[in-house]
Image: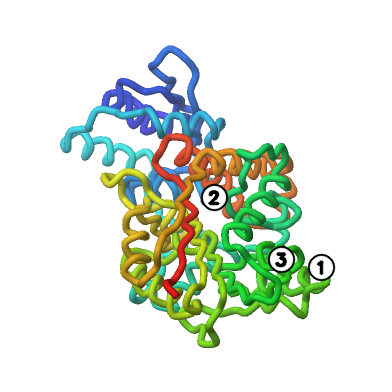
């Protein structure tokens, strides 16, 4: 085995002469970095790591190897820096073929490993109600306790607002919820629709502090159960109704106001116009909308990579702000205010990551190890996206004429 793995590493050394990382194989063979200082070390714990990459070359194969545990990384933060800065020279086709052949020899004869259980490849036409439900539940139906492990006590799973002096995650999330309520100018007795209500934090805040009646919708039954329980505990069970429902199926408008927080990212380019039209249909004339969602900043970047597509947010597609605005305007909305919170979200993700990493043993008790590995890289990659300007997040306040 040692001779075969050494030949593979020698060819890898030739293909990637500028290498700010180390590679270790299951038999102890090691390839050091060439940049003169330490970087992350990729350790293949079994030949399955190579087999995954051979089966799906690129990000998906590496992701499968990592999620399955066949590939370990000793420094996750260094990995994020590597992904942001490392631009290797292209490997010629002949050399790539030789590297793949030696990798197959090093891995030895074996059946192609199955994709990890945490992977979802949605089937059917994109953004149908059925497919959207499967995709959303893949992300959220881990367990309520798993999300409570890293969120604040209110279970608010969206960007907090730190810019006004918040010093804790709880304060930042309170500030965000209250900002939304104030932007919507909520009044006692009004009717609010909260699209993508999660565990009910926004609905409960609006009912307890602004006296409105709230209909919150989610596609996750575990979320809905806890949201109803929390509304009862807050004394607003009679003012907060939580439904497991697709926004396209709501038929009991009109509402005075709509909050859509962290929902539009799941809609996609094909459905953004029907989404805006449905919200307009559900509002009374003069009704107000607060649309809060992640957006891509650069028009040259893809919507999402295969790792996110299969393991984090299947079918999610952050659109550009201009595309969302076009849909809202075409549906009849008048925009009054747009505000970005890019740096606030980077700080929110840092707080979530610190909570998550504080007790990884607890995280592994609350979810399977594959899911924990996904979250460790997802939280960092998301933060990196906001820090580098790949992503931002915008609140758009709009209304219907009349």
Residue 381 placed where, x, y %?
49, 42
Task: Using the image as rendered, state which of residue 243 and residue 364 is in the foreground.
Answer: 243
Task: Using the image as rendered, state which of residue 288 and residue 31 is in the foreground.
Answer: 288
As drawn, which residue projects farthest toward the top? 36
Pointer 2 residue: 374
Q: Is residue 260 left or right of residue 328?
A: right
Question: Residue drawn 57% across and 63% down?
Answer: 184
Residue 234 placed where, x, y %?
81, 68
Residue 343 appears in the figure: yes
Disc 2 packing (10 Å; few <14; some 14–19; many ≥20): many
Q: Distance between the residues labelled 2 and 3?
A: 38 Å
**SS class, disc 2:** helix
The correct choice, above or below, for 246 with respect to 379 in the image is below
**SS class, disc 3:** helix
Disc 3 packing (10 Å; few <14; some 14–19; many ≥20): some
Task: Using the image as rendered, state which of residue 105 and residue 83 is in the foreground.
Answer: 83
Pointer 1 residue: 234
Q: Distance between the residues labelled 1 and 3?
A: 14 Å
**SS class, disc 1:** loop
Question: Residue drawn 66% across and 63% down?
Answer: 202
Question: Residue drawn 49% across and 84% down?
Answer: 249
Pointer 3 residue: 210
Disc 1 packing (10 Å; few <14; some 14–19; many ≥20): few
Picture quadrant where residue 185 is located: bottom right
In which quadrant of the rendered image does the C terminus lie? Answer: bottom left
Residue 70 appears in the figure: no
The correct choice, above or below, for 152 with respect to 39 in the image is below
Q: Specify which label sits upstream in the sequence, 1 or 2.
A: 1
Q: Is residue 274 left or right of residue 77?
A: left
| Labelled pair 1, 3 in contact (Cβ < 8 Å) | no
The correct choice, above or below, for 211 with respect to 326 in the image is below
Task: Using the image as rendered, state which of residue 10 and residue 128 is in the foreground.
Answer: 128
């Amino acid at each position: 085995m040692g001779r075969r793995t050494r030949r593979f590493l020698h060819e890898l050394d030739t293909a990637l002469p500028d290498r700010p990382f180390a590679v270790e194989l299951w038999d102890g063979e090691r390839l050091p970095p060439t940049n003169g200082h330490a970087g992350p070390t990729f350790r293949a714990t079994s030949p399955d790591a190579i087999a995954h990459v051979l089966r799906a070359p690129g990000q998906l194969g590496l992701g499968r190897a990592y999620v399955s545990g066949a590939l370990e990384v000793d420094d996750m933060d260094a990995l994020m820096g590597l992904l942001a800065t490392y631009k290797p020279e292209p490997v010629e086709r002949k050399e790539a073929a030789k590297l793949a052949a030696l990798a197959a020899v090093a891995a030895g004869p074996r059946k192609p490993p199955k994709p990890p259980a945490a992977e979802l490849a949605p089937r059917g036409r994109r953004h149908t109600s059925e497919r959207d439900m499967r995709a959303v539940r893949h992300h959220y139906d881990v367990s309520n306790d798993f999300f409570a492990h890293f969120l604040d006590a209110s279970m608010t799973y969206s960007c907090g607002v730190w810019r006004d002096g918040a010093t804790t995650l709880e304060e930042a999330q309170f500030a965000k919820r209250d900002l939304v309520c104030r932007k919507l100018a909520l009044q006692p007795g009004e009717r609010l629709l909260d699209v993508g209500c999660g565990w009910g934090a926004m609905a409960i805040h609006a009912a307890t502090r602004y006296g409105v009646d709230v209909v919150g919708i989610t596609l996750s039954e575990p979320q809905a159960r806890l949201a109803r329980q929390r509304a009862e505990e807050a004394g607003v069970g009679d003012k907060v109704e939580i439904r497991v429902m697709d926004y396209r199926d709501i038929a009991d408008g009109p509402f005075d106001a709509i909050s859509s927080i962290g929902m539009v990212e799941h809609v996609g380019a094909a459905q953004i116009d029907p989404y805006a039209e449905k919200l307009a249909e559900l509002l009374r004339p003069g009704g107000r909308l607060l649309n809060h969602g992640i957006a891509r900043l650069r028009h040259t970047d893809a919507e999402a990579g295969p790792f996110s597509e299969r393991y984090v947010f299947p079918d999610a597609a952050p659109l550009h702000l201009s595309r969302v605005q076009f849909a809202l305007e075409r549906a009849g909305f008048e925009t009054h205010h747009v505000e970005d919170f890019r740096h606030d979200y980077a700080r929110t993700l840092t707080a979530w990551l610190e909570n998550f990493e504080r007790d990884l043993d607890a995280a592994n008790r609350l979810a399977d190890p594959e899911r924990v590995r996904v979250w460790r890289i997802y939280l960092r990659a998301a933060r990196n996206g906001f820090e580098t300007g790949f992503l931002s997040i915008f609140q758009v306040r709009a209304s219907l004429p009349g």
